[in-house]
Amino acid sequence: MRKLYPDIHPYAEHMIAVDERHTLYVEESGNAHGIPVLFVHGGPGGGTSPAHRSFFDPEKYRIILFDQRGCGRSLPHAELTDNHSQALVADMETIRTTLKIDQWLLFGGSWGSTLSLLYAQTHPERVSGMILRGIFLCRRQDVHWFYQRGASVIFPDYWQEYEKVIPEEKRGDLLSAYYDLLTSDNEIARMSAAKAWSVWEGRCSTLDPNGDMVDHFADPHVALAMARIEAHYFINHAFMEENQLLDNTDRIQHIPTVIVHGRYDMVCPIEQAFALQQKLPQAELHIVRDAGHSAFEPGITDNLVAATDNFARSLA
């Protein structure tokens, strides 16, 4: 079973201003003359971490990580103004042109798969391939499953902790109720809601309980950006038409694609990966039988590293 490559450090770090308000953190590691690959993180609002560099052979890849608007080391933190899907696609293009890259491989999981698909459908000529994990189509039914009813019946104990932040009379629309708290002027209410929202996601992300992951999601800096930005995107339907990603797959039929999805993914149920693969018959779908949502579960990691190794050979 393949494991992550050893830890590495960036050889270049950039703060790229993409408009008058937002400045993005961007880093490069690995081989400066290698195959360009863009790591597209989840959330939205999740940010990157040093471990994300390790899915790629550092001798073969020019590894590019960036924190999307409002999260990680990008500024301003947890900012919602001018933060929408079309802006993120434009930001990716700004990064590509700034770094003088013609084509790159996209590597995205969860919301990162959403944004990778949206970018590829907008700029198909700039994508050499895609590795997508934990497919999130961002339809209303997908958001409802995790934030209203669906995962709640699998994890009723965790759900109770998530739900109790909201007064009982408002629980018929938890997304709206959370959004109101997360955008309120009450700092204590904002942080309490942010932690409950983010911890719910962290607890559900792995097949086996993972305390370190839950602690990461509970970190106030991570939780505030994750919860505020996710709620902002989801209440606005990710700034996309319903079913947009599936309806526009004709634009990316030619792009080599590998899909990796855990059989027991409770954050983004596997039906989404299956629906995408039906629209992209050329794509490889790898169902990991003993995994949930996280990229760091052994079976998921094994498949992702195998995919990056295979692309390193085919794109060389």
Image (cartoon, rainbow, N blue to C red):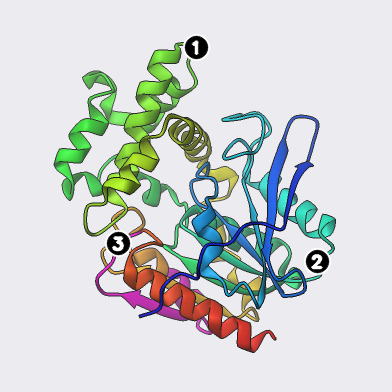
Which residue has dot 3 on it?
292
Contact, mark 3 vs mark 1 (Cβ under 8 Å): no
**Label 3: few (<14), some or many (≥20) within 10 Å?**
many
Residue 130's place in the image compared with 316, above or below, is above
282 in the magenta segment:
yes
Mark 1: few, some, or many residues within 10 Å (few <14, many ≥20)?
Answer: few
- Which x, y percent locates residue 58? 62, 72
Q: CA distance from mark 2 to mark 1?
A: 42 Å
- The residue located at (52%, 50%) in the rendering is 49
- Numbered tag placed on residue 147 in the rendering: none
Which of disc 1 and disc 3 is earlier in sequence?
1
Quadrant in the rendering for residue 201: top left
Q: Whole-percent x and y of residue 240? A: 58, 48
| Residue tagged 2 | 101
- Look at the picture and state if 161 lies above or below 293: above
Which part of the image, by quadrant, shows the N terminus?
bottom left
> Viewed as shown, does residue 124 lie left or right of 45?
right
For the point 55% across and 85% down, the residue is: 310
Q: Left of 17 or right of it: where is 138?
A: left
SS category of the residue bearing label 1: loop
Q: Which residues are magenta?
A: 275-293
Sequence-wise, the earlier of marks 2 and 1 is 2
Residue 176 on image: x %, y %: 40, 28
The residue type indicated by label 1 comes to: Asp
Location of residue 194 (image quadrant): top left
| Spatial CA span between label 3 and label 1 | 36 Å
As shown in the figure, which amino acid type bears the numbered disc 2?
Answer: Ile
Mark 3–mark 2 distance (CA, rounded to whole Å)? 34 Å
Mark 1, residue position: 185
